[in-house]
Image (tube, rainbow, N blue to C red):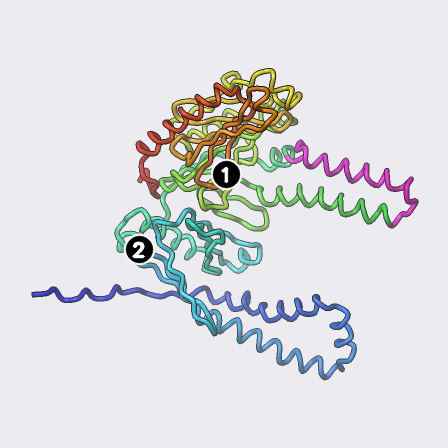
Amino acid sequence: MTAPPEAPEAVTERRLHPVTPFRRAWAPVAVLAGWAMHDLDQAQRQLARLTTTTLLLGLAVLLPTAALYGFLTWWFTHYSVTDTELRIRTGLFFRRTAHIRLERIQAVDVTQPLLARVAGVAKLRLDVVGTDKKDELAFLGAGEARALRAELLARAAGIAPEAAAGAGEAPSRHLLRVPPGVLAVSLLLTGATWGTLLAALAVPALLWPATHSLWTVLATAVPLLGAAGARSVGRFAGEYDWTLAESPDGLRIDRGLLDRTHETVPPGRVQTVRIVEPLLWRRRGWVRVELDVAGSANSVLLPVAPRAIAESVVARVLPGVAVPSPAALSRPPRRAGRRVPLWWRGYGLAVTPEVFAARHGLLRRSLALVPHAKVQSVRLTRGPWQRALGLADVRVDTGANRTVTAWQRDAGEAARLLRDQAERSRTGRRDAGPDRWLAGG
């Protein structure tokens, strides 16, 4: 006697926010503008031939067509959440259904561009293992986006669907906020900002005696000054009001002056932590903390913070890991200076029971911490000059497709390090727990 077939899973499909058609209606207009920019002279000639009546008739056709396109693309877009996946069904002429497995979701971020904040809507963006492009739902109501994010995280953690739907966002505990004044000063003390400004002043000064052309000088100076300003202003706007909080689903980041972003650093998915210390920050004791997260675009944990605070935050990202002090980092042998004069002093290495830590940089120091369990492979490389000097580089590859290198080590030390690191990585992966959302909940 055979058991009756199971009933198909009941799935409730939902639509995006009604404001979405206004966003999508711009697509036909953008196509037309792209065609015009592709051949600007031809477009100008065509426009010159149009009469006022013809132009008005064209607009009378284009605007309703764009509005109809926006409405139909919104009407034929649905999403649904099942016990195991998020489904997104789209397509006006060609239907496409994306099946996103919940256990493969790396991060779920909520972003609100300026106009979206005015309209009270938000964009949900998902980082998924094995994909370079983020899937997104744009737009949802701001409250709906946060509720859906909480539901996805809860279901990914294995919470029953009936409980996950009303679980709400996990509680969080505030850790720190970067004051705007500190952020502004840190940007002014960044070498890239001053480098671009010096180039904007030096290059025109050199061009003027050579060309005596004011237009040439302006054409060179203005883009350089604009690049320096845009770099600093863009970073300030993107990192404004940087707030960090801790919750069972990871470390939450809220940031942005015009466009607000709500991100989460996934627990257990961090492959590498880098503590960056620019030269002009050292007197103030400031550092920047960056991340490599497998399958995720999240790359900054703290834009600027005192070193002690930054190290306490790193301990939350990598539990049980203590950041090695500068004195604990061993330099390469002095003969490395024959291959890399002066700069060899910026290299350092420390291997603790928890992490492989490598430093490089003399003016802008960067200390990379790789947990042994996250090392995918380890390699020893030697060039002809290194072989002559008895030196070698040891490279560890992580799950984020990034490499951390211990530069210019003694060849015998490098061979031992290669052998020992392979064993540490094997035992680290064996003893590591599963990477799950809500690991502390």
**Magenta span: helix, strand or loop, mainly?**
helix
Choose between 418 and 34: the one closer to the eye.
418
Determine whether, in the image, residue 272 is placed left or right of residue 239.
left
Q: Which residues are magenta?
A: 187-215
Determine whether, in the image, residue 392 is placed left or right of residue 209.
left
| SS class, disc 1 | loop
| SS class, disc 2 | loop
Number of the front mark, 1 or 2: 1
- What residue is rendered at 45% in x and 32% in y? 378
Choose between 397 and 168: the one closer to the eye.
397
Question: In the rendered view of the protein, which quadrant contains the N terminus?
Answer: bottom left
Residue 143 belongs to the span the image colors magenta: no
Choose between 139 and 218: the one closer to the eye.
218
Per the image, the residue denoted by label 1 is 402
Determine whether, in the image, residue 68 is placed left or right of residue 280.
left
Amino acid type of the residue that numbered disc 1 sits on in the rendered structure: Arg
- Looking at the rendering, which quadrant does residue 3 occupy? bottom left
- Looking at the rendering, which quadrant does residue 49 occupy? bottom right
For label 2, count other residues whose C-alpha is less than 10 Å away and answer few (under 14), some (14-19) or many (20+). some
Can you give x and y, in whole percent of width and height, for residue 394 in the image?
50, 28
Per the image, the residue denoted by label 2 is 84
Question: In the rendered view of the protein, which quadrant contains the C terminus?
Answer: top left
In this rendering, the answer to whether 322 lies above or below 67 is: above
In this rendering, the answer to whether 330 lies above or below 232 is: above
- What residue is rendered at 53% in x and 71% in y? 70
Choose between 382 and 318: the one closer to the eye.
382
Amino acid type of the residue that numbered disc 2 sits on in the rendered structure: Thr
Can you give x and y, in whole percent of width and height, for residue 9 in the image?
26, 63
Residue 188 belongs to the span the image colors magenta: yes
Rendered image: mark on residue 93? none
